[in-house]
Amino acid sequence: MIDCVENRLITSRRNLLLGGASFAAWAYLPKFARAADGRDPRLIVVILRGALDGLSTVAPVGDPDYAGLHGSIALTADGTHPAIMLDTFFALHPAMPEFARMYRDMHATVIHAVATPYRDRSHFDGQDVLESGYAGPGRLQSGWLNRALEALPRGERVSSGLAVGPTTPLVLRGNAPTVGWTPVALPQADDDTAMRLVNLYRHRDPGLASALSQGLQLEKAASGDDMKRKPGNAVVQMRQVARGAAKLMAADDGPRIAALAFDGWDTHANEGGPVGRLAVLLGGLDGALAEFESGLGERWRDTVVVVATEFGRTARINGTDGTDHGTGTIALLAGGAVKGGRVISDWPGLKLANLYEGRDLKPTTDLRSVIKGVLQGQFGLSDRVLAETVFPDSAGARPMKGLVA
Amino acid sequence: MARDSQAALVALNRFGFGARGGASGDLINAASDPRGFVKAELSRPNGVLLEAPGLQSTPQLGQAVFAYQDQVKQAREAAAKAGAPTEAPADQKPGLRRNLSLNAVATEIAGQMAKAKPTDNKPADNMAKPDAMQPNAATPPVAKPAPQPLNVIQKTFRAEALARLQRATLVECGFTERLVVFWSNHFCISASKGELARIWAGAFEREAIRPNVLGRFADMLKSVEQHPAMLFFLDNQQSLGPDSRAGQNRKRGLNENLAREIMELHTLGVGGGYTQQDVTSLARIITGWTFAGRQGQLGVPGSFVFNTNAHQPGPQMLLGKSYEPTGLAQGEAALADIARHPSTANFIASKFVRHFVADDPPPALVARLRDVFIKTDGDLKAMSTALVDSDDAWKAPLTKMRSPYDFVIASGRLLARVPEDPGSYLNNLNLLGQPLWSPAGPNGFADTSATWAAPEGIKLRLDIAAQMGARLGNNIDPIDLLEFAAADAASIETRRTIERAESRQQALALLLMSPEMQRR
């Protein structure tokens, strides 16, 4: 019976992913694209919804309390599926060989024991805080990435954009116009009908007018046989989304700044260790990073991919070989522009007294510092804009230096 | 008259599923007594129940899944013994279930497109591209529509979906059906969780939601949290009291998933005054709430049972109150108290008003419904009546965006087409981001206009409306339909846009996409 449940859980996650991956991009090029120094920075924000178990992804195998707490699902440096040692203390999940390679090439880094300012354990509030960039939940009007775009000099409109899933993730919602695309096979309404409707909306419903106009701009570029959504497992799904995104973002007039979200990280039961449910998902994420790298080609050099999640999971596994909602977790950076090859962490330790509320990895780094560091390194945003507009009331979380080469 | 038509629009669109076309006279009836039109359904609680030939109970369906899984297992073992490929036949391979149903849907669309364009010699597959949905892209696209036989899970899901779609299309106003959708989303499960969740999705709504939509909140809460579908969806059937006999024997223990969502999503709401300690306590209290498995050791397979062996012994402190170890009654007492908690009244009233009236719910109306909820001990009929009786609910402008489900139902009603097959509905809901009974998380589908008015979503709606126009535009008069849908409450611009359309097909697409049809 237990085996059956486990199998079905994996299947169901796969099904969820069919509807659970989304992608959207800024509708403009930053003005300094193709500037004199030849740098043409790109930023991709990947949101993992459901709360990633940071302790299972980048395991502190050197911490004497880790193996006991993570119990049956703990990673080890030896055995049949050994974790990949990143240094003498931290080991990467064996389902992520591509990330390991980027790390060795100094183009990927891990920030451990991070968290947003949110300290409760609701997914939905946690995601709001992660994506809105406000210190607390309930602010759903705009996301931090969108507000960062508003601070950038706006150049030409991009000729293509894409979104998987028919809604824009909160992180990219706001005043700065975005584009998206849905890779489904559906005959499209003809232009004449569309223009008549836009015209009606302009007179009667400005909100719908703007939504539809934006929606219509997307279809132009976002096509190509290999980008149709095909069924497959989670790994294939994530790869395909990333491949489609990279293809459009590699173009000279394609989007530079984009966000996507992968669902399904809420591993309450039968999470699995080096193999199992989380391993499948991490394999998908790893594949997506590899797709970004190959799809962006020359432009990978100027790219940073930020991977973040709303919070972590309990340090101790629960009664069903999974983990419940926690606090501290990891953030990942990958890309040619990343100054990588290191795990950045002010490690709090896993002794009971050091755990947050006696159960979670204690956060020692503010995720906003990490993201600010990336935005500053890639786009030169000032401390002030970052502390007031992008992440309001966050002056205490200083931008982390030296993340971007 | 104009004012009455406007009120009729509120009655039909804000509270119901929109006017039916044909000879229904919905708009005229609603205009003559808007409140009475909406409230008529509230006096028929039995009308909310859904019984259709062939729809089975949760235990029966659970047993069907168990039997199906046994069959698959045997087939696999037999094949392995015979040295044949180890894979089960395609129609029995769990990983392909969804793909096959998508495939079937694609075949259906291809068929419809072919019918819609009889003079077009191009193969229909160019338009519907079903190959994009097939597990193996090399398979020739619908050259020969040889649909795989559906398994019992797929068949059940489609039958349940069809019954719900038909009911929503046929009812007069649709207020109680909208209430069903609201509560079903509030207490959502997701069919994507697995085979049991998929086969139980419809039964869950029929058994736990519908009987209580005009009853008491506490009763709905208990029915929901004891329903096998919910226990499966939020992992409670795996949760064992750490000190229970089963917990000790099997070295497994607590899973706090259901307990957390009960408080966060079903009752008190985030910030409703509970702590992590309370989550853990409630998780312990409801250990042992499970359903009987295929062996039936605990009871009728697929039915709710309380498993004493898995239940955490001892008293528990929850929200400042101690609950004595009374077995199943411990959890029932806890739920009854949570249902009565002031935070619950507040959370439910806000969510209810947000759904029906505005994304930013008018505080006075929320306060009023909260008071009704408290005063009547959670009488949901009283709360629904209070909503319809309030002036705020009628005065607020129609700014809410119809959800994809509202949109496809309202379109079907206006076109007076009773669905005979759920395929195209399910497909459209998938495309628009609201797959039936399958939200991405336990918080259900979003209920704000921003979610459903996103650029890609609107563009997709237009594509779907254009398809409907192409398929059905021949046989209808769009101006008549506009009369059915909005009469003189329609804006002059909408009327002109439809009158000046270049074809009936185009006019129908524009009508379905008009603000009068999109906003509620």
Image (spheres, coloured by chain):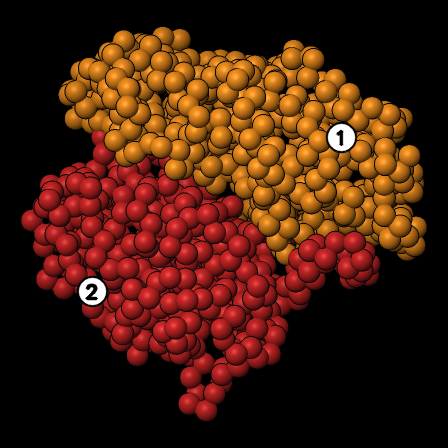
Whether residue A218 is situated above or below residue A50 in the rendered picture: below
Query: Which residue is painted at 89% across and 50% down in the image?
Result: B492
Relative placement, left or right, of B32 versus A307 is right
Side of A378 relative to B404 (left or right): left
Q: Nearer the viewer, residue A180 or B108?
A: A180
The quarter holding residue B173 reads top right
Mark 2: amino acid: Val
Which residue is outermost to the left? A64
- Element type where label 1 sits in the image: helix
* The C terminus of chain B sits in image quarter: top right
Residue ID for mark 2: A343
Hey, what amino acid is under mark 1? Answer: Ala
Q: Is residue B359 left or right of residue A108?
A: right
With B330 as the anchor, is A128 left or right in this view?
Answer: right
Q: Is residue A376 above or below residue A359?
A: below
Write down the colour of chain A. Answer: red
Q: Chain B, which colour?
A: orange
On the image, the x and y values in percent for residue B298 come to 32, 10
The quadrant holding residue B256 is: top left
Q: Which residue is mark 1?
A: B11
Residue B411: in sight, yes or no?
yes
Q: What number is the disc on residue B430? A: none
The subunit carrying tag 1 is: B
User: Observer-nearest residue: B441 or A234?
Assistant: B441
